[in-house]
Amino acid sequence: RMIRKQQLGNIIQITNRMVVLADAGAWEDLPSLQTERETLISTFFESAVTPNEIGWVEAGLRELLELERTIVQKTNSQFQVVSAHLQKLRDGKKAYEAYEQNK
């Protein structure tokens, strides 16, 4: 049982690290952590949760879901920022092309 608690703790730890990296804008580091986390989650759920484990597993999963929501919110915010920058670049390109045509 202790090993399973450690597994869930490791999953939560990695997810917390992902939140910190998202806060820092270190988006390039998230995919490798996500892959590592997915492997740990798969391993964790290879065996069924026993009735004795339900309480702490449920609490851990609730914590994971909250952290995941935070990551998704930060990702969406970053996506909006990048999209706005891309739109400005497109607008600038259009303005430049129009200028070049009217020279």
Image (cartoon, rainbow, N blue to C red):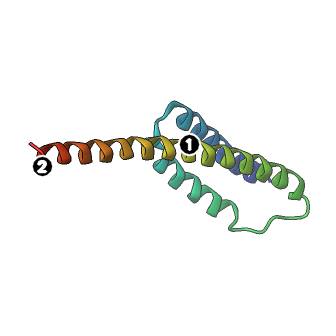
Q: Residue at x 56, y 47 (%)?
A: 76
Label 2 element class: helix
Q: Which of the image's four quarters has the C terminus?
A: top left
Query: Quick one: 58 or 28, which is closer to the camera?
Result: 28
Residue type at tag 2: Gln
Marker disc for residue 93? none
- Where does the image place residue 30, in percent across and percent down from the top left? 49, 45
Eyeballing the image, is 26 above or below 67?
Answer: above
Using residue 5 as the reference point, say whether residue 33 is left or right of it. left
Query: Quick one: 20 or 93, which is closer to the camera?
Result: 93
Using residue 1 as the reference point, say whether residue 42 is left or right of it. left
- How many numbered discs, if any? 2
Q: Are marks 1 and 2 in contact (CB under 8 Å)?
A: no
Q: Residue at x 46, y 36 (%)?
A: 26
Q: Residue at x 44, y 47 (%)?
A: 83
Eyeballing the image, is 37 above or below 99?
Answer: below
* CA–CA distance in space, label 1 to label 2: 36 Å
Provide the residue designation for mark 1. Answer: 77
Query: Quick one: 101 or 38, which is closer to the camera?
Result: 101
Dot 1 surroundings within 10 Å: few (below 14), some, or many (20 or more)? few
Provide the residue designation for mark 2. Answer: 101
